[in-house]
Image (tube, rainbow, N blue to C red):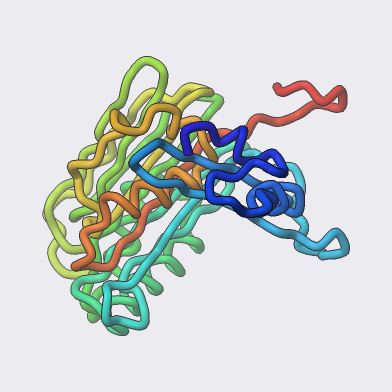
């Protein structure tokens, strides 16, 4: 779409249709976002919440988007992800069970359960605890980040092939993981700290997503909803030969009673 805004207006069509489809989706959606570039395709995010639903989301401190897709031919993903709010802070986990299928999925599930019960620990201590829990399983690659907005920092520890990146107006910082398999062979668990600002975005993914991705071909994508960011990067950089997981996180823009962002 050369002009997504025009495509949202009723009656606009490049194919001779009534031109009401995307506009209708937008009006009916509780949350809607779109990203489109000529010759690169379009991605649309639409969420529907019934007005009477008890699940209708309240004001959130964080915007989070994630995808977890099994390897083609598998019915269950050996990857996993989770997050947990701790007051004003947020802990984010991405795990990649060794191999594919149910046994890999069980390792990731055990890692997620262990993460939730120990989320108050530092990332390094949490991974050490997960390592003990995963003994006897296939094991997994694990990356764990703890974002502290008040302290303007994000602490990260990783073992295995989980990539992490903090992106902000001042540039981007790749997070460091050490080699190993949590639950099997972990020689070193080391925690690193990176700067975090209000405009920052955290992105973590398993090796089902190529490490060669870049935001350069997608002007404006980083400002779209994290779910849309995750979808576009998976669409264009998913390897298609492995389970794939990607998680994108940023601080939500909270609206005050006057309707102004804060």
- Residue 134, percent across and down? 29, 72
- Residue at the image position 62 percent from the left and 34 percent from the top: 6
- Image quarter in which the C terminus is found: top right
- Residue at the image position 23 percent from the left and 77 percent from the top: 100
- Residue 70, percent across and down? 33, 72
Nearer to us in this view, 169 or 37: 37
Query: In the shown orientation, is residue 21 left or right of residue 180?
Result: right
Q: Residue furthest top?
A: 170
Would you place residue 164 above or below residue 239 in this image? Answer: above
Query: In the shown orientation, is residue 45 left or right of residue 95?
Result: right
Nearer to us in this view, 87 or 22: 22
- Residue 218, percent across and down? 36, 33
- Residue at the image position 72 percent from the left and 43 percent from the top: 10
- Residue 188, percent across and down? 15, 49
- Residue at the image position 29 percent from the left and 32 percent from the top: 217
Nearer to us in this view, 205 or 106: 205
Would you place residue 5 above or below residue 237 in this image? Answer: above
Query: In the shown orientation, is residue 44 left or right of residue 218?
Result: right
Give the total number of marks visible in the rendering: 0
Query: In the shown orientation, is residue 227 left or right of residue 257?
Result: left
Q: Residue furthest front?
A: 16
């Amino acid at each position: 779409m050369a002009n997504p805004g025009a495509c949202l207006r009723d009656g606009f069509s490049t194919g001779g249709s009534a031109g009401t489809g995307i506009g209708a989706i937008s009006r009916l959606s509780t949350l809607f976002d779109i990203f489109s570039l000529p010759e690169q395709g379009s991605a649309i995010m639409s969420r529907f919440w019934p007005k009477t639903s008890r699940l209708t989301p309240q004001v959130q401190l964080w915007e989070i988007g994630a995808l977890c897709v099994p390897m083609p031919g598998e019915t269950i993903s050996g990857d996993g992800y989770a997050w947990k709010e701790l007051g004003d802070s947020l802990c984010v986990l991405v795990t990649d069970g060794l191999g594919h299928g149910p046994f890999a999925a069980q390792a990731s599930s055990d890692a997620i359960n262990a993460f939730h019960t120990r989320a108050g620990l530092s990332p390094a201590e949490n991974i050490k605890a997960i390592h003990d829990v995963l003994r006897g399983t296939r094991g997994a690659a694990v990356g764990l980040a703890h974002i502290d907005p008040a302290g303007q920092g994000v602490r990260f520890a990783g073992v295995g092939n989980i990539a992490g990146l903090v992106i902000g107006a001042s540039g981007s910082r790749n997070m460091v993981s050490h080699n190993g398999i949590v639950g099997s062979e972990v020689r070193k668990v080391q925690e690193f700290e990176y700067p975090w600002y209000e405009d920052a975005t955290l992105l973590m993914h398993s090796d089902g997503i190529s490490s060669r991705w870049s935001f350069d071909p997608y002007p404006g994508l980083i400002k779209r909803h994290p779910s849309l960011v995750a979808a576009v990067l998976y669409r264009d950089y998913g390897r298609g030969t492995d389970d794939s997981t990607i998680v994108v996180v940023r601080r939500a823009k909270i609206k005050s009673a006057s309707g102004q962002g804060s």
